[in-house]
Image (cartoon, grey):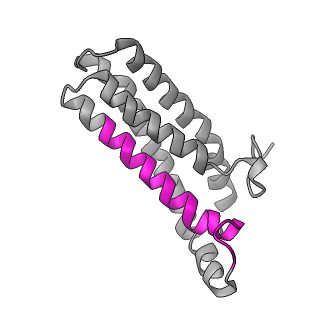
Amino acid sequence: METGLLHLHSSLRYIVLAALLYAIIKGWKAGEQAVEGKERRPYLIAMIVAHIQLLLGLGLYFMGENGLTALNSLFDTGASLFSSLGFFGIIHFVLMVTAITLITKAHSLAKKNATHRSVVRLMLFALLIVLVAIPWPFYGYGSGFFPGM
């Protein structure tokens, strides 16, 4: 079960990135207008997909070997924060929760009829954090661009 959950979590990253990019592009085109009505949908979709990804990630964190087990091993072995144990035990978890908090705050601003620009700024910052925190293969401890294939 853990392997399937890991493959789903790893593959869903592209849907999260696409949803964030779509929301950012739609918001950027709208400019300084206030967010009203159906214009909130891209932000809502990005938030929902990010929260689904968060739930899958939390399941992996508490059940899998890259979460609490990695965190315990990190402290037991005294490994570096930039090792695989440190990345999955602390860095990935903290950065992704921070990014999803920003996405949620951006959607909250959109519901309060803020301007698209202010919402897009938060979404861009969240996207930057997500791109840094994804375990890409070139980091040395990623699971590949298309895990399971």
Q: Residue furthest left?
A: 112
Locate residue 17: give its quadrant: top right
Q: Is residue 135 above or below residue 83?
A: above
Identify which residue, 95 or 51, lies in the foreground. 95
In magenta, the rendered stretch is 79-106
Do we see residue 49 in this rendering?
no
Left or right: 67 as drawn, with respect to 119: right
**Residue in view at x 67 percent, y 83 percent:** 78
Tell me if residue 48 can be seen: yes
Q: How many marks can you see?
A: 0
Q: Quadrant of residue 117?
A: top left
Residue 105 falls inside the magenta stretch = yes
* Magenta segment main secondary structure: helix
Q: Where is residue 44? Give x, y as percent.
A: 35, 31
Image quadrant holding the N terminus, namely bottom right
Q: Position of residue 58 (x, y in %)?
A: 49, 60
Q: Residue at x 18, y 31 (%)?
A: 112
The C terminus - image quarter: top right
Q: Residue at x 65, y 61 (%)?
A: 2
User: Farthest bottom residue?
Assistant: 76
Q: Position of residue 80 (x, y in %)?
A: 68, 73
Q: Which residue is depicted at the point 60% across and 47% down?
A: 132
